[in-house]
Image: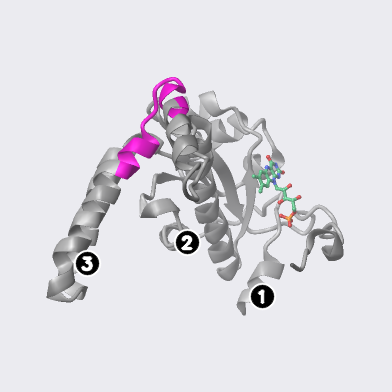
Amino acid sequence: MTLEEIINYRRSVRHYKKQPIDEQKVKHCIELATLAPNSSNLQLWEFYHVINPEILMKIATACLNQESATTAQQIVVFVTRQDLYRKRAKKMMELETQNVLKNSPTLKQEKRVKSWKMYYGKIMPFLYVRFFGLFGIFRKIIVNIIGLFRPIVYQVSENDMSVVVHKTCALAAQTFMLAMANENYDTCPMEGFDSRKVKAILKLPYGAEINMIISCGIRDEQGVWGDRMRIPFDEVYKKV
Ligand SMILES: Cc1cc2nc3c(=O)[nH]c(=O)nc-3n(C[C@H](O)[C@H](O)[C@H](O)COP(=O)(O)O)c2cc1C
């Protein structure tokens, strides 16, 4: 399929055939999902590939027994891990330093390494740290002052940063669904779930959040509910 055909093929499937799907192919689609663009390349995500029938059943119950979950052959839970920001920032600092040493002209290396240290060592921890909303308020005050003198990003509250982490994870989820369509496999993204139950089933730590749960399988004849409907394009397309 061409990319356009893949995009057209992907539908949210609510009922799957009782036909197994290849675990390795799904795993490969998750690997492709990690290539999605993501904020500051911090990759604050994790992917739980559920194939164990007992756990599948528990997750389906936590997905409010939606048919898409109860008939799924496998399920992938997309999880955000904002709490890992220090660890991931440290890793990115190492990788960017190696990248500079490998690819930058010798004269520019020192300055570039220093700026990555600043970015991942100071700015990222400052933006991602959380403490009951208080750090977010502090950040807001600072950016509002700086904003008087130059353009700046204002979305730095603790809620804003949570949105950043979730939108990044959603891009991985979409990449995964397209990769699955490329394998002629079907999916359905779900936000109708009991997050506490899912966290308990997967034994996730306090700082983890569920972004989306994606059921997987092969569509049944009645698996797609009706035609694809979209708001007329003219209503959403604004030429500037
Ligand atoms: C964030 C998100 C959450 C969704 N949650 C559910 C859900 O809980 N259950 C469900 O059946 N579909 C869910 N959907 C699927 C949408 O209903 C579906 O994408 C939309 O109707 C458009 O249909 P299409 O995906 O076939 O193009 C969700 C989609 C997204 C993006």
Q: Depth check: 26 or 117 in front? A: 117
Against 38, residue 64 (above or below) is above
- Residue 127's place in the image compared with 61, above or below, is below
> Which of the 4 image quarters holds residue 136?
top left
Disc on the earlier residue, 1 or 3: 1
Q: Give the residue at x 67% y 75%.
A: 5
Query: Pointer 3: residues within 10 angstroms few (<14), some, or many (20+)?
Result: few
Question: Of the numbered discs in the image, which one, if any, rests on residue 4?
Answer: 1
Residue 107 lies left or right of residue 71; in this view the side is left
127 in the magenta segment: yes
Does residue 20 appear left or right of residue 16 in this picture?
Answer: left
Q: Nearer the viewer, residue 178 or 96?
A: 96
Picture residue at 56% right of the left edge, 42% below the top: 212
**Residues under labels 2 and 3: Cα distance?**
27 Å
Label 3 near ligand 1 (CB < 8 Å):
no
Q: Which residues are magenta?
A: 123-137
Q: Is the magenta region chiefly helix, strand or loop? A: helix
* SS category of the residue bearing label 1: helix
Q: From the image, which quarter does the N terminus lie in?
A: bottom right
Q: Callout 2, which amino acid?
A: Cys
x then y, percent, for residue 6: 64, 71
**Badge 2 is on which residue?**
29
For marks 2 and 1 on the same chain, the one whose residue lies earlier in the sequence: 1
Q: Is residue 156 above or below residue 3?
A: above
Identify the residue at the far bottom of this view. Answer: 2
* Disc ID at residue 99: 3
